[in-house]
Image (spheres, rainbow, N blue to C red):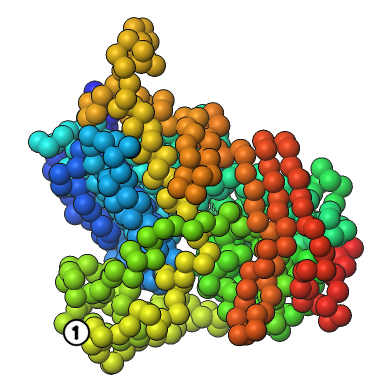
Amino acid sequence: MASRKICLALGFLAFLWAEFGAQNQEEELQCRLMGKFNLTGYVDAKNHSLIIAGLFPIHSRTIPVDESILEPVSPICEGFNFRGFRWMKTMIHTIKEINERKDILPNHTLGYQIFDSCYTITKAMESALVFLTGQEEFKPNFRNSTGSILAALVGSGGSSLSVAASRILGLYYLPQVGYTSSCSILSDKFQFPSYLRVIPSDKIQSEAMVNLIKHFGWVWVGAIAADDDYGKYGVKTFKEEMETANLCVAFSETIPKVYSNEKMKKAVDAVKGSTARVVVLFTSDIDLSPFVLEMIHHNITDRTWIASEAWITSALIAKPEYFPYFGGSIGFAVPRAVIPGLKEFLYDIHPSKDPNDVLTIEFWQTAFNCTWPNSSVPYNVDHRVNMTGKEDRLYDMSDQLCTGEERLEDLKNTYLDISQLRITNNVKQAVYAIAYALDRLSRCQEGRGPYSPNNTCAYIPTFELWQLMYYMKEISFEMHDGKRMVLDENGDVFNGHYDILNWQLDDNGEISFVPVGKFNFKSTTKFELIIPNNSSIFWNTESSKLPHSV
Ligand code: TCR
């Protein structure tokens, strides 16, 4: 039955692809479809009975495909994302840790199949289809000769990607555990029956923002959103909460994903033309970058930015040269953690280990600004359009060859920065959620199991994905630092807090994220904002005093 379903999905895809008429030749179709895909990532699946899939933004975008090519082509990715690379490594590190533990899944080991989503929906969809149809044989409900089965997915990164992937994965009940997709609609189990997450819904963050605004007595606040589910739903719930609190939204604009002079101008003009001194920015760091450059270009220095969790600690934005424009930003971050052993694991990387490991080679080239000898891995080419709207290659092949002697210790790079492990810890929690659910499934006692009619159990590797979903729902477990992770019936975190951080300049001239308070939540209705000392906050205003926005 299950494999029939997969064929049906493929048939539907073929229909979409329009090129393939013959829906009954599934096998050939599958090969042809997969042949078109162009995915990069890491697989370690041999000798493991259970496989966990992963999706991470190791690149930030795809290069627009040449419009003169008529055939569908799988785009190439660019913009190496050191933060996403660290998240991906954390998934591998966590799986290794679980495999070494005797108390979780003692009779099974976990493997993985991880792809780069390039922070785009297309790549996330390509990956979801490969997970389901199994280029690598590891597919849900399909046992290869060694009995490996794809159990769940960690991902997909941005909300728009998770929404898209979840629409297909949900058909199979393949559990998808999000580490960063926070969009409120993902709580809707009618639409996303197999999506769970270890990050709170943005409904809570919007509430937090409005509480912060009330705390400082602001009543007239602008809002800028990324042009995706995260930004748009984030600002939508923010506006609703503002209305409920009788506060006013001065303007609400979006930052385009693909540079458009006209659209960007609209957002810039809204900020410039409004008397609102305080502006909420609901966007990922990747999408925010071009807007930051515009603010610098227009020399806008006297605004106070309320940061959403996605950019508050981002090295892409928190650059000292941006401080005159973005210093004093205040916003929310998910709790920070220390992850034992992660630092050593991250440092254990070298391009000479595996000539086929194109991502490590690209990491090295980008980090050290050199070209790895005899490799065809592109170096730092950037096809983004610049502010004049023209395509601009910002970098080119470095003629400096890498020697392999470059020292990671000398590198100041967000990949190795373990001072702000927040989403990184979410990745760890997501992997653990899956491992604990599988562990509980494996410990079921016949006659006392959860499935009717006769209280039966499910077994590894023959279980069905919906049977695993039973254990994933309302999961509760303790992490390495003693913190408990509990999900509600919608697969959401409902008990926890955000740290409130404020951008200040430290003695070395670097931006530091200074904790100035907390926002606690105990359910979707019980909140508490704590800012013990307003004077601990740095404001980017002429007088250095609290800005007025009325
Ligand atoms: N939720 C965003 C994506 C996102 C993100 C991040 C991306 C969040 N935090 C940090 C990069 C870095 C929060 C979404 O799309 O749901």
Q: Is residue 274 above or below residue 437?
A: below
The percent position of residue 298, horizontal first and vertical second, equals 69, 83
The percent position of residue 45, horizontal first and vertical second, equals 20, 47
Beta carbon at label 1 within 8 Å of ligand 1: no
Q: Is residue 368 above or below residue 153?
A: below
Q: Quadrant of the C terminus?
A: bottom right
The answer to whether residue 332 is left or right of residue 217 is: left
The residue labelled by disc 1 is 373
Q: Is residue 17 above or below residue 501?
A: above
Q: Nearer the viewer, residue 99 or 134?
A: 99
Q: Quadrant of residue 409?
A: bottom left
Name the residue: 67% across, 45% down: 204
Kind of element beneath mark 1: loop
User: Looking at the image, how many numbered discs can be counted on the residues?
Assistant: 1
Residue 405 appears in the rendering: yes
Q: Amino acid at mark 1?
A: Pro
Residue 21 appears in the rendering: no
The answer to whether residue 351 is left or right of residue 384 is: left
The percent position of residue 519, horizontal first and vertical second, equals 71, 50
Q: Nearer the viewer, residue 207 or 394?
A: 207
The percent position of residue 306, horizontal first and vertical second, equals 71, 63
Disc 1 packing (10 Å; few <14; some 14–19; many ≥20): few
Name the residue: 38% across, 36% down: 436
Q: Is residue 502 above or below residue 120?
A: below
Q: Quadrant of the N terminus?
A: top left
Name the residue: 67% across, 79% down: 505
Name the residue: 54% across, 28% down: 489
The answer to whether residue 161 is left or right of residue 335 is: left
Residue furthest to the bottom in view is 399
Residue furthest to the top in view is 454
Residue furthest to the left in view is 145
Q: Quadrant of residue 523?
A: top right
